Amino acid sequence: MPFRIGNRDARRLWLDAQGLGTPLVGEPDNLAIVRRLGFVQLDTIRVVSRAHHHIIWSRNQHYREPMLNRLLAEERGVFEHFTHDASVLPMEFYSMWQRQFRRLKEKRERSKYFSSVPGADARDAIRKRIADEGPLSTHAFDTKVADRGKMWARPPHKLALDYMWYAGDLATSHRINFNKYYDLSERVIPADLLTQDPADETQIDWLCAAALDRLGFATPGEIQRFWEAVGAAEVKTWIGQATGRGGGRAGPSVMPVEVQAADGSWSNAFAAADIGARLAQTDTPTSRLRILNPFDPVIRDRTRLKRLFGFDYRVEMFVPAAKRVWGYYVYPLLEGDRFVGRIEVKGDRAEGALNVLAFWPEPGVKWSPSRWDKLDAELARFARLAEVQNVIWACNRP
């Protein structure tokens, strides 16, 4: 019989693995938070605070927005690249990202977006400018879009910069007002990491094991989608080896498990061989109520989210307003190991206010005075992240 993980235990393990089991207090160790998560997704939308800031803040309420750029630009604790989307990753992971540079370079060479990327001579000229002048953003160049009628059309210099960035030839030096500044990788990445290039098998093993560790338990598809840096067939081969069915290991490091969903059904997955001990060491999640970002790693895989928590959620900022079920940028509300509602809020820095635009309790959840107190406390914390003073309910408070 496979090892069975009940639904409450599955929620507990997943939230703990993602740093939401226990609220961290004191001076935030932002690199430790990024390391624990594996990566933090970057996003341009700023309704209250951009996703990357919000995600780290959810793990430590004393985090503030300038801290991430210091970690990137001054401390060189993280580097930027592409997982499922643009993200920051711990710098120490760089050597395990070498095959991802090659994979994304080859993928971009096949994509329509990069079909008109400038040739080697033009790219070399851009690289020389960066070498001579230091980090440059796209605003330092003035080539124009050739065909404005094409979707995602970009100026040639932007295509060249992105192509070299995906390939690892350029790296993000820093950001100003979220504008990316490109520099030579050898001036950003420590030399000892820049020259390491472990065998593909070593990188695949690390990527799969690191993904499973941060997921707690997972299907092969969830392991593959975590970084988006390995293929489905590569994950399948790795699971065969890690469970001892594919040879090449002294003993299994992964075991099959069954995981219970919120509706009581069971499904097959995999977990580390010490899953029993890990569960025994995982505490019950804090009862604190949290406002989570739509791009939080706990929210991002919405199929897994619904399966484990019974919480049906979708991102609607790219949905026409008339077709939205909820709103433009709606935040899930997590209390303990249960989603108790969703809320739409918007920061107005000019007026110094955090405006509550809409609120929806989850069906069957009773909003007692103590639960309202928890939400008020979290809104006050959220306002401090946005550097505003007042929380204003612009909608009727149920």
Image (cartoon, rainbow, N blue to C red):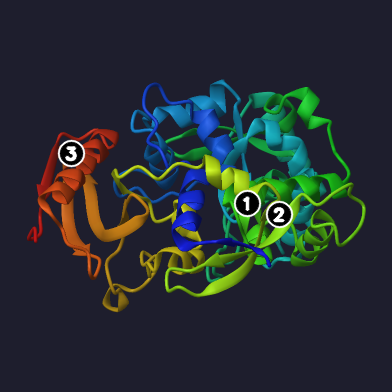
Which residue is at 61% across, 49% downward? Answer: 276
Whether residue 137 is visible to the viewer of this picture, yes or no, is: no
* Quarter of the rendering occupied by the C terminus: bottom left
Amino acid at pointer 3: Ala
Return the residue at label 3: 350
Please report whichever mark, 1 or 3, sits nearer to the chain's N-terminal start. Answer: 1
Return the residue at label 2: 229
- Mark 1 or 3: in front is 1
Please report whichever mark, 2 or 1, sits nearer to the chain's N-terminal start. Answer: 1
Are dots 3 and 2 in contact, CB under 8 Å? no
Please report whichever mark, 3 or 2, sits nearer to the chain's N-terminal start. Answer: 2
Which of these two is toward me, 62 or 261? 261
Which of these two is toward me, 313 or 185? 313
Percent coordinates x, y for residue 352 in the rendering: 16, 37
- Alpha carbon distance from label 1 to label 3: 35 Å
Secondary element under disc 2, as helix, strand or loop, is: loop
Secondary element under disc 1, as helix, strand or loop, is: loop
Are dots 2 and 1 in contact, CB under 8 Å? yes
Q: In which quarter of the image is residue 64?
A: top left
Left-right relation of 108 to 327: right
Are dots 1 and 3 in contact, CB under 8 Å? no
In the image, which disc is placed on residue 112?
Answer: none
Amino acid at pointer 1: Thr
* Quarter of the rendering occupied by the N terminus: bottom right
Which residue is at 19% across, 61% downward? Answer: 359
**Mark 3, residues whose alpha carbon is within 10 Å: few (<14), some, or many (≥20)?**
few
Amino acid at pointer 2: Ala
Return the residue at label 1: 83
